[in-house]
Amino acid sequence: MPEQEPIVHAAGLVKRYGDFTAVHGIDFDVRSGQVFGLLGPNGAGKSSTMRMISCVSKPTAGFLRLFGMDAATHGPAIRARIGVCPQQDTLDAELSVVQNLTVFARYFGIPRATAAARAADLLAFVRLESRADDRVDALSGGMKRRLSVARAMINDPRLLLLDEPTTGLDPQARHLLWERLDQLRRRGVTQVLTTHYMDEAEQLCDWLVVVDGGRTVATGTPAGLIARHCTKEVVELRLRQADAPVEELNRLGLRVERLPDRLLLYADDGEAAAAAVHREGIGLRSVLVRRGGLEDVFLHLTGRALVD
């Protein structure tokens, strides 16, 4: 039996704005039912890629298919089958919570009765049923993000695009939204998301593509990327003297990274590495042994330089 065609297929995807190339020939597939994460620093090409997937910006070169259709020529048909939750809330503050769903449903030609029923179900799903008649401007930031996700689902999409879905939310609101997105995954809703939160990507995503400077630098599962580009544990060393020489660490045969406020020592056995550091007699203020994670991978692949 042939493998099912991916929901999204990109090959040699390029996006230019005048003389500036934002996306340099990236390739990826998004499988049905998958939660696909697109990671990268600011200016890496994530937003340009998301705009092409959502069919509001045509590729400059390369090939992009969604649901087996060419994104360059079948934009309206594709947009009818996707839901988009943008990074910035675009809710109508003059309408009530429920009206933001039912009025938006008209863009998809959804009958009023169907729209009302879906709106009620979606508000219950995102725990906003008690706020249905409130004005949007009375909602907290977390409530607005949940409403944005509900609105993106009003057309019962096969593909949901989420651009920084939890930016600015407190931990409680983030975890509630994570729970709801995981429920959508279990329902079989395919999701493509961008995020700057590595714990979010590790928690939600089945497959990741890391981009930098518009180019792909790594792909894989969260666990696979950690295994390939990091060690099982990381030892964070804070020295008594920030500028103290640390030549002794080179004798340990481990990767060492110096940061302005601490040293990072990458090891599969963090406790053994910390004990070895103590034996070298290096003056330390504190030692922390933690699990190697996706943030370590991300910074290793894309660098620590601040990008505005």
Image (cartoon, rainbow, N blue to C red):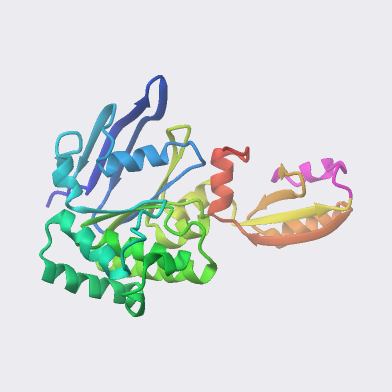
Q: Is residue 264 left or right of residue 97?
A: right
Residue 215 visible at all:
yes
Query: Which residue: 38% across, 65% down?
Result: 136
Residue 67 visible at all:
no
Residue in the foreground of this view, choosing between 221 and 159: 159
Q: Residue furthest bottom?
A: 130
**Does the magenta-highlighted stretch encompass residue 248?**
yes
Query: Which residue: 25% across, 62% down?
Result: 153
Query: Which residue: 22% across, 48% down?
Result: 6
In percent of width and height, residue 34 lies at 30, 56
In percent of width and height, residue 177 lies at 41, 67
Residue in the foreground of this view, choosing between 270 and 31: 31
Quarter occupied by the C terminus: top right
Query: Which residue: 28% across, 42% down?
Result: 53
Highlighted magenta segment, given as a residue range: 241-256
Q: Is residue 12 left or right of residue 138?
A: left
In percent of width and height, residue 68 lies at 15, 43
Q: What is the chief secondary structure element of the magenta stretch?
A: loop
**Does the magenta-highlighted stretch encompass residue 52?**
no
Q: Dividing the picture into quarters, in which one does residue 128 lie? A: bottom left
Q: Is residue 308 left or right of residue 84?
A: right
In percent of width and height, residue 140 lies at 47, 68
